Image (cartoon, helix red, strand yellow):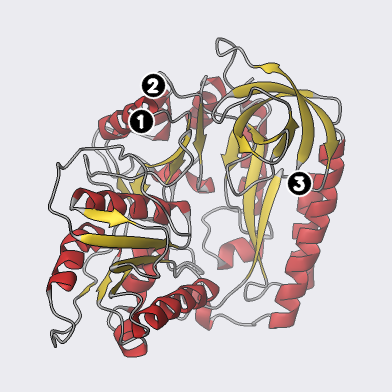
Amino acid sequence: MISKAEPAAGRDPGPKSPAGTIAFVTLGCPKNTVDSEHMLGALVGDGFRTVGSPDGADVAVINTCAFLGSAVRESKAAIAELCELKDRRSLKRVIVTGCLAQRAGGALLEEFPQVDAVLGTGQWGEVASVARRLLERGDDARDPAPVRIDDPGGALEPGSPRALSTPRHIAYLKISEGCDHRCTFCIIPRLRGDQRSKPLEQVVDEARVLAAAGVRELNLIGQDTTGWGTDLAGGLELADLLQALDCVEGITWIRVQYTYPRLWSDRLIETWGRARRVVPYVDMPLQHIAQDQLRAMARAMTERDTRALVKRIRAGIPGVAFRTNFIVGFPGETDEHFQALMRYIEEEPFENVVVFAYEREPETPSYAMTPRVPLNVRRSRRARLLGRQQELSRRRLARRIGDSLTVMVDGPAGRGQWAARAAGSAWEVDGGVVVEGTGLSPGQLATVRVTGAAAYDLFARVERPADPALNLIG
């Protein structure tokens, strides 16, 4: 994704002397997007001018993903494209940042000698100074490319400038970085470090700045948002943060993503259910339901615990919509384990389901686990689970025809149509609502009547703009 800098939401560093043009490529998850926005803010504040394409730019920064082998391959393909531009002298400098930089380090320079600098996840703040130094040195300079991969991390510092790349009414708000869990399939702690929470006052201040800039939907993100506060003094937990953010004027919806099952508490459920701005949407990767698989994955949750938690959340958060992830083909997964998972999505329907076919990662404990599930079986199970989920989703949405619901308008979607979402859908990753009507604008709430349904999307016509004085998540 090539991101164009929007007006910064954060401290204005003041004008700097012109430094050149910068193109930014962001891969991976919303956490990476936030890091890119902070790096863009630093670069713009240092005098760089953003351009939409790396072809012809002075510097291209690529913020990479390396969560899975497939993400590594995608990142390397994108780096290769930038290096090709540099070989053609259509691009002067290439800087690689993010998770692949953290994971591979200097080995990237052996594979891509055209790369001019490698900055790990904890060194995002150095991007502006490194970019300036690279442009100041001559093309014939023989200085070795800088490689900075010290402690892993990400953008959490207070007051750092930020250039939003999302639509103006939507913003991600990173509340934490890193993860204390050690799931046997996951490399995230190595790439991002242990749990580090952004202080409550800092999160609230940032939310107020975003609201003042026109943001209406905040998406709280982190590797483990339910872990927020566990490393802070005072015994704070996510429920405290949600209570504070629920009081921020100007925000319509607050959505929490990337929660971890083990850290959900009854107090969190109660706070979530009562909050006026926190939408009834739970993003909680479960990964599996079979007891043997949960144990092998080191999920710290039994099958019984998992089932009970989902039911407690449904009972405590009225109208909740669930988004979850499952992994199929993990070492030791039998046909019986997979059938248990197939039955579970029938018994406990989830609104949004993501399914990964297990990928072996050399740096994880599961890499050496046996028995291994053949690749063709992994892919087949993924297709079967997704196929069944699609059928269930189609039936569920068909039952919504004729319903009236409140949606947030995201933007135009063609002649007389608008892209919108109900509270139970997250931007970019879940299904939406295609609305017919006029006089709408992005960030606005509207009441619509559902007229049709597909596998993941609804179709509707606008009835009236929603009264902002009404329950914001009604």
Residue at which label 1 appears: 207
- Secondary element at tag 1: helix
In the rendered structure, the answer to whether residue 129 lies left or right of residue 22 reads left
Q: Quadrant of residue 349?
A: top right
Disc 3 packing (10 Å; few <14; some 14–19; many ≥20): many
Whether residue 375 is visible:
yes
- Secondary element at tag 3: loop
Residue at which label 2 appears: 248
- Inspect the image, locate mark 1, and give the three-letter code of the amino acid beneath it: Ala
**Residue contact between numbered discs 2 and 1, judged by CB atoms under 8 Å:** yes
- Inspect the image, locate mark 2, and give the three-letter code of the amino acid beneath it: Val
Instruction: Residue 151: give x, y in percent of width and height.
Output: 23, 65
Disc 1 packing (10 Å; few <14; some 14–19; many ≥20): many
**Residue contact between numbered discs 1 and 3, judged by CB atoms under 8 Å:** no
- Residue at 81 percent of width and 48 percent of height: 455
**Residue contact between numbered discs 2 and 3, judged by CB atoms under 8 Å:** no
- Choose the circle earlier in sequence order: 2 or 1: 1
- Choose the circle earlier in sequence order: 2 or 3: 2
